[in-house]
Image (tube, rainbow, N blue to C red):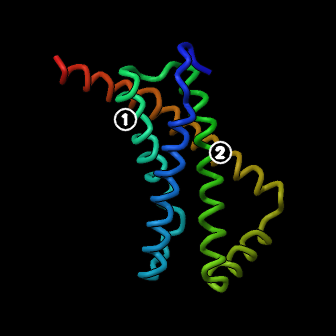
Amino acid sequence: MSTDDTSLKKYTVIFACVYTAIHLILMGGMYIFDIQNGNSMNMPMLMVSAFAVSKAFINDNHRAFHKSEKRFLSIICTLIAFAASIFVYILVILLDPNMLVEEILTLIKSLPIAVWVIIVFIVALIYYFILGFFYGWVTNKIFAKQISEQM
């Protein structure tokens, strides 16, 4: 996982907390103000969460991610994003069962399972590449900026 025993567990927890908190806040706002935005906020939520992880990692370790750390975090954080989204939607359904149940069931029934598997796979790949970009290039830019400010 890492070349120098840096534990990445802390950073997966940071990602999970930030992503879930943003998701809950947005869903709460959408519910309170009766806003229908679909899933247009998924990518910004992913980016903000990845930025928080990158910043915390740089502050703790004074370096950018190694390639193996970047890959590990990209995979785990993609899975966390899916799990957090499912958790938030289940919570919303439990709080207001009439809100989404019919829409979700209609949507699920509208396409064959094979199509859903392909959709989930494509979305997971997009998440993985966005997280890889953040844990790679963006983290390196943040680290380089931090180093230049210290000089």
Q: Amino acid at mark 1?
A: Lys
Query: Residue 91 versus residue 102: which sits nearer the camera?
Result: 91
At label 1, counting other C-alpha atoms closer than 10 Å, the crowd grade (few under 14, some 14-19, many 20 or more) is some
Q: Tell whether 125 sits left or right of 24.
A: right
Which percent across, then down, holds residue 56? 39, 35
**For residue 144, which numbered disc appears in the image?**
none
Considering the image in quadrants, where does the C terminus appear? top left
**For residue 79, which numbered disc appears in the image?**
2
Residue at the spot 70% in from the left edge and 73% down from the top edge: 104
Q: Amino acid at mark 2?
A: Leu
Distance between the alpha carbons at the discs numbered 2 and 1: 21 Å
Q: Which residue is mark 1?
A: 55
Residue at the spot 52% in from the left edge and 32% down from the top edge: 132
At label 2, counting other C-alpha atoms closer than 10 Å, the crowd grade (few under 14, some 14-19, many 20 or more) is some
Q: Tell whether 37 sits left or right of 126.
A: left
Which percent across, then down, holds residue 100? 64, 78
Q: Tell whether 102 sits left or right of 21.
A: right
Q: How many numbered circles does the render carry?
A: 2
Q: Secondary structure at mark 1?
A: helix
Most distant residue in the bottom direction: 98
Considering the image in quadrants, where does the N terminus appear? top right
Which percent across, then down, holds residue 65? 47, 23
Most distant residue in the right direction: 113
Which percent across, then down, holds residue 52? 40, 42
- Numbered disc in front, either 2 or 1: 1
Vertical relation: 60 (above or below) 119 = above
Residue at the spot 72% in from the left edge and 71% down from the top edge: 107
Q: Secondary structure at mark 2?
A: helix
Q: Quadrant of residue 143?
A: top left
